[in-house]
Amino acid sequence: MNKKQVVTRFPPSPTGTLHIGGARTALFNWLFALHHNGKFVLRIEDTDRARSSKEAIDSIIESMKWLGLDWDEGPYFQSQRAEIYNEFIERLLSSKKAYYCNCSPDELERKRIEAKERGLKPKYDGKCRELGLGKSPDAVIRLKSPLSGTTRFKDLVKGVISIENEQLDDLILQRSDGSVTYHMAVVTDDIKSGITHVIRGDDHINNTPRQILIYNALGEPIPQYAHLPMILGPDKSPLSKRHGATSVLAYKEMGFLPHALVNSLARLGWAYGDQEKFTVQELIELFSLDHVGKSSGIFNMEKLLDLNAKYIREADDGNLAELLIPFLTNLGCSNLSREKVKGALRTLKARSKTLLEMAQGALFFFKEIDYEKQADERFLIPEVLEILKDLLLDLKGAPSFAQEQLENIFSIFLERHQIKLGKVAQPLRVALTGKTVSPGIFEIMEVMGQEMVIKRLSNAISHIKSKKGP
Ligand code: GLU
């Protein structure tokens, strides 16, 4: 049998930034297409001009690129496709599946109220259905929906869903100003792009029978549908700001690796046993709608943080450096050498949950330091002055700053002074980093290099001297 190529789509309405829920929908469509060697189409549903914005479009596209969800076609913009929609509406008019209706808004409103008063579902009464009206300035175009029968589809996640056609209205397809309505645009675009699978949030499930009626009227086959359960927070209430940031780019700014977020998104409603970590390749190979559950996915920020920490630990230093440099730059560092950034991040990889945390922890390598007050008061004290001065001499004479070399110098130095490393390590740490907590002292000295270490140690010595007074 000649199987059709799978084509999926992600059609965001650009009324705000891309949120976790939208990103999960995009990811599932992307994975499904790639799994089947198919195509993934990006379409911007910007027919609501008043609520759409260029900033939202840019931020959605930036979010998709950051997540690595590349598309094969598009982005198409609904606002630029009026001609195509008109062509499809023309098809419906000429096959008598749609008709002009010139009922005035006042009349419709009056009928709506009357129906409600009589306890009936407010629905267009079909007054113009058979009148054969032509185009006029105030006329809209409506779909001639079937008056009886059932519209049924098999959702790949939810199972069979059916609705009596009596319940469905003669939908407006085109407004009197000539603009097309939402359902007509979606169906036209999906047909034009050859969409085979519509994977979307279950908040759209009520739209589906209405859209199917349009497919039927056009004589086009309907795609397969998969409506994804909504996403909840750890307390089982719908995911919202209360549970942490909801916009994808906020996660970028907080220093998450895109792959950590992709991994967490993949697990929102989809599972493969208990496996928590997947490479992109594994996700593509393993993803299937059969493993999308009926129950809601839970988005857990704590888990995401742990996952991010794991990915940071495993990341290649060169790649991590590329990702870290913008964070360091944002924090005011300039003239960053990639090699030094790599050295710095090696000391911090095991202790950072996010790139932002890592950049903050690495600042002392790249920027002038201030001593933390308590660290200064406790460790940069006259009692250590002579020891630090002597250490400075040894360090000035060091032939290299490789860790083993430093360890040697220190063991001779400690032996000479008959002291333990603990005695000198904290004052030295404060002198070099301004803080009492940092990665290992030899590690950071190696990355800083001789010149910087000597400068900082000399500064600390002068600082202690100034405390002693003249
Ligand atoms: N534009 C819709 C939204 O952003 C999606 C419509 C669809 O998937 O059919 O929610």
Image: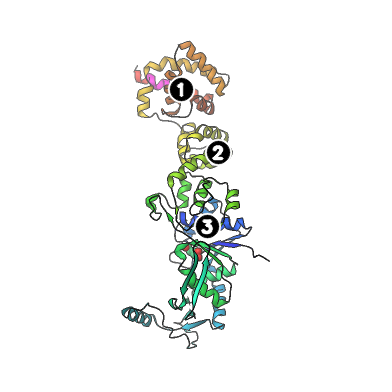
Q: Amino acid at mark 3?
A: Ala
Q: Is residue 270 visible?
A: yes
Decide: marks 2, 3 in contact (CB < 8 A)? Answer: no
Q: Which residue is mark 3?
A: 26
Decide: marks 2, 1 in contact (CB < 8 A)? Answer: no
Mark 3 Cα within 10 Å, few/some/many (few <14, many 20+)? many
Real-space Cα distance between discs 3 and 1? 53 Å
* Rendering coords of residue 73 (x, y %): 60, 61
Say which quarter of the image contains residue 339: top right
- Residue at 35 percent across and 80 percent down: it is 115
* Rendering coords of residue 244 (x, y %): 40, 49
Decide: marks 3, 1 in contact (CB < 8 A)? Answer: no
First in sequence, mark 2 or 3: give its number.
3
Depth order, front residue of 113/271: 271
- Residue at 54 percent across and 83 percent down: it is 96
Q: Secondary structure at mark 3?
A: helix
Real-space Cα distance between discs 2 and 3? 26 Å
* Rendering coords of residue 295 (x, y %): 45, 57
- Residue at 46 percent across and 22 percent down: it is 457
Q: Which residue is mark 1?
A: 457
